[in-house]
Image: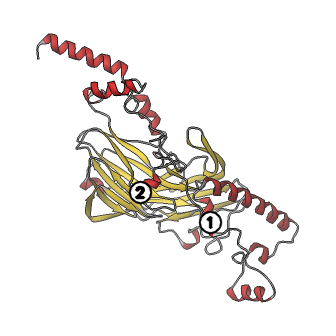
Amino acid sequence: MDRRSFVKTGAALSAAAALFPTSLLAESAKKANNDKYPNPLVPRMDGDVKEFQLFIDIYQQEIVPGMKIHTLAFNNQIPGPEIRVNRGDKVRVVFKNETELNHTIHWHGLYVPWRMDGVPYVTQMPVMPGQEFVYEFVAEPYGTHFYHCHWGTLLHMQSGMYGSFIVEDPDDPIKEQFPYEREYTLVYSAHDTDFIRNELNAMLERMKERMYLMKNGRFDKERFAVFDSKEELEESIRNGYQPPYLVNRRSPSDLPQPNWFTVNGKAYPATPNLYIKEEESIRVRLINAGTEEHYLHLHGHDFWQVCDDGLPIPQPWQMNTIRMSPGKTFDIIIEGKNRGIWTFHDHDTRRVTNNGLYPGGNLLALIYEDLPMEERIVGPMAGKQMEMKGMKADMLPKIALDE
């Protein structure tokens, strides 16, 4: 190529760069993307104890532009803030309930003392409105874990009461085998917005009644549906008591039927993206804090499954689709060996919908941020087709809301 042709080509690429809205590759887009990941919670040091403050309140969450719902959120964030500690750290979490509902925190996958496990009426009393509870434990084991409410779990978890808990090790066994430069946390969930709205309102009304009865000394075990033993329950039934499962508030059709599917509290097109560079490796921590099973598939690549429920796998698995059941966590390593913009999505496409409309839900992209300019430009034929449809020819990649 002679100098004139080179300059001409360079000028054309510069012009294209000026016209092409590299929305996914702009610095502003990458900075905004950082806000779509869990916000680290900074501890206060009390001697050798790392103390974290968590509160729960009713919060309005925007799942996608134009779609907001009332949820229950730790520190007004969905997912809740990410807690990161080193293996062996002494941890204290001061939990304040600022709602009119009962709550607890269960530390999913962590080796906490049984009194710290957050199961109401098994390990602790529920944390009632306005109350605090202090959780204390030593951070074990290493790996990717999470925390969530264990009271009214059917409602509270899909309403946003979950967050990541990462136990690190200075001698990271994964980094030794797969040197990675950066990492991402993706927390998956599923939501029935009608169920959340109706059940949240109903629970608030029930709690108002219970609090009134307690204040006036008229609240008993039968009203609270809590008994000291099976024999005590059977005696109450013989005396005419009807347990809640006989006068069920729900029929099977009233159980949650998710119509929104989120990653870090957002559905496509508001989902976070994964950025990578050629020859770079990234670690992605996957957490299923919802009730649905997901089959996460990455286009154009295989990845390495390196941890299962936080535990390093002796022999990592190479795959491009991973099955993630409710409550599971996986860590995967993606190697930057095939530059481009690639889809990472749930292969059960029912989970890639917004209120029944495809595409939506658990859909995001793996983006090579060093993608050459010539690969970002729309080809002449595609550009002409787009112009015929009334679109600008310099608008890829697009946000598609209805296919």
SS for callout 1: helix
Q: Is residue 129 visible?
A: no
Q: Position of residue 309 (x, y in %)?
A: 40, 64
Mark before the other along the chain sequence, 1 or 2: 1
Viewer-nearest residue: 190 or 94 = 190
Q: Position of residue 132 (x, y in %)?
A: 68, 59
Q: Amino acid at mark 2?
A: Asp
Viewer-nearest residue: 46 or 214 = 214
Give the alpha-carbon distance from disc 1 to disc 2, as whole Å. 22 Å
Classify 88 as above or below 381.
Answer: below
Q: Residue at x 39, y 27 (%)?
A: 395
Quarter of the image for the N terminus: give it: top left
Which residue, as the protein is rendered here, is positioned at the far right?
216
Q: Residues within 10 Å of mark 2 (few under 14, many from 20)?
A: few
Q: Position of residue 370 (x, y in %)?
A: 28, 33
Residue 250's quadrant in the figure? bottom right
Viewer-nearest residue: 43 or 225 = 225
Mark 1, residue position: 253
Residue 63's quadrant in the figure? top right
Mark 2, residue position: 348
Q: Residue at x 31, y 20 (%)?
A: 16
Classify 50 as above or below 314.
Answer: above
SS for callout 2: loop
In the picture, measured across the screen, residue 162 lies left or right of residue 280, that is right
Residue 398's quadrant in the figure? top left
Q: Is residue 146 visible?
A: yes
Q: Amino acid at mark 1?
A: Ser
In the picture, measured across the screen, residue 230 lies left or right of residue 389, that is right
